[in-house]
Image: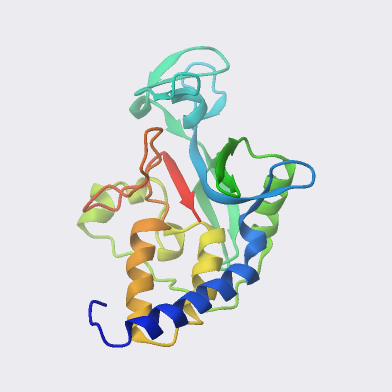
Amino acid sequence: LNTPEGQGDFKKFTSLIISKTEKELKWLYETNHTEKIKGVINYIVWSEVFICSNCSDEFSFYDGAFDERKNILSSDLTCPNCGSVNKKRSLERAFEAAYDTLLKKPIKRVKQKAVSINYSVGTKRHTKKPDADDLSLLEKIERFELTDWFPADEIPQIERFFKDGLHLININNTTQFYTKRNLIAAAKLYQKLTSNRQKLMFTSFCDRHIVKRNRWLPTGPTRPLNNTLYFPPLFAEVN
């Protein structure tokens, strides 16, 4: 990647591939700004859903721990329904049954909820709650038939599998490291790459930027926890 030969051509050709893919997949990363103006999604904050130990109501980690007015994330979770305060470790995650369209089989997964969208209109950034069109887009993505190649390998059940709690959240396959939206985009882009140099650059980027391991923090930036396979209760789905 650091060799000087052909850097101009490499950058030009790679930029053309990215530009073409962006046009093809523009619909994946659009959101409403106004009735007539669309914004481009920078990232979506996703939250795990927990079950209150007091009233058994379900609520997202985001709703229970994040104070939007103060921009502070608490270590304690307050149930929006009954007001009880709990430590995360004392709460059970909510699970749901689903059909995995990538693995072609039924699975049991942690319930997750899109809670906030950061997007741009021109050079200005905005934040919003997901609206009806955003939720409809998620359903469309869930139904999307991905025909391009993508890695779908079973995760070895060795030290980090248990140390980082993957067995507790039913993460068993490499596809589950990504949202369906980002896996579609990554697979579409990867199949257009023609050199090992491009593929090395791209896969290095993927591991640090588009995985569900990307912790969302109100103070930023978003990044995985180093040297782990930890999946945070709040993650950023980065464009």
- Residue lying farthest top? 83
Query: Looking at the picture, does residue 75 appear above or below residue 116?
Result: above
**Residue 103 visible in the snapshot:** no
Query: Looking at the picture, how far across and down is residue 82, in whole percent?
Result: 55, 12
Q: Is residue 23 visible?
A: yes
Residue 150, percent from left and from top: 48, 74
Q: Residue at x 50, y 23 (%)?
A: 68
- Report how many numbered discs are placed on residues in the image: 0
Residue at point 36% right, 43% down?
221
Q: Which residue is more in the foreground, 233 or 106?
A: 233
Q: Going by the image, does 7 lie left or right of 4?
A: right
Which image quarter: residue 55? top right
User: Where does residue 67 sit, x and y in percent of width and height?
Assistant: 47, 21
| Figure check: 190 above or below 154 | below
61 or 163, which is in the foreground?
61
Residue under the point 68% across and 46% down: 134
Name the foreground residue: 13 vs 231: 13
Can you say whether 124 is above or below 77 in the image?
Answer: below
Give x and y (percent) for residue 83. Answer: 51, 12
- Residue occupying image coordinates x 34% and y 62%: 207
Query: Which of the 4 image quadrants contains residue 114?
Result: top right
* Along the viewing direction, whichever of 115 and 85 lies nearer the viewer: 115
